[in-house]
Amino acid sequence: MRLAGERMRRYLGKACFAASFASALVPTAIAIPSVVWNPSQPDPGLYVLTALYSISIGIPLALLHALLLGLPAYLLLSRRWRFRWWHGLVGGALVAALPIGSMIVWSELAAHSNAADIAGIARVLLYLGLCGAVGGFVFWRKMRPDEAIAA
């Protein structure tokens, strides 16, 4: 079932914000358990500051990714295909990892990087992809037809 007009725009805005918020919380969700499971860290306050930093910087960046890249991709592709959960996962991972990943890979290829540098790039891209996949899944969850009708 399709929503029309103002209601659809309002609902897309809520879904984009929820996806961005969820994407920005992934680094925090990774940092906080490391403090809990390893309390002998030299400075546990550093993890708290890292969590606050990732939220304060991550939410605006994730929202920009969602609005400038994810939303147009969703609107374009949803005209042809039904939006499924795995579309949200893959699309979110691509929206998060491709812009920064392409810049990193391009600069590292120009610098003739070694295997250790390439492994570091792969870790960064996987991390960004994880953040984006979480955001894409939350976006799919908010855009499900039963959710849209109930709102």
Image: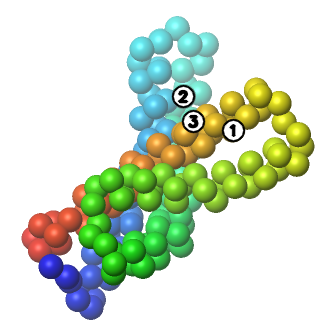
x 89%, y 43%: residue: 111
**Crowd tier of the residue under label 3, counting other residues whose Cα lies within 10 Å: few below 14, some 14–19, many 20 or above:** some
In the rendering, at what x and y percent does residue 100 appear? 66, 54
What SS does tag 1 mark? helix
Q: Please say if 129 is above or below 84.
A: above
Q: Which residue is mark 3?
A: 50
x 42%, y 14%: residue: 37
Question: Please, what is the three-letter code of the amino acid marked with disc 2?
Answer: Tyr
Q: Which residue is mark 1?
A: 121
Q: Which residue is mark 2?
A: 47
In the rendering, at what x and y percent does residue 35 appear? 47, 20
The answer to the question of whether label 3 and label 2 lie on touching residues, with beta carbons closer than 8 A, is yes
In primary-sequence order, the first of circles 1 and 2 is: 2
Cα–Cα span, label 3 and label 2? 5 Å
In the rendering, at what x and y percent does residue 95 appear? 52, 60
In primary-sequence order, the first of circles 1 and 3 is: 3
x 47%, y 67%: residue: 70
What SS does tag 3 mark? helix
Near-viewer residue (124 or 113): 113
Q: Please say if 119 is above or below 95.
A: above
In the rendering, at what x and y percent does residue 144 appear? 20, 65
Question: Please, what is the three-letter code of the amino acid marked with disc 3?
Answer: Thr
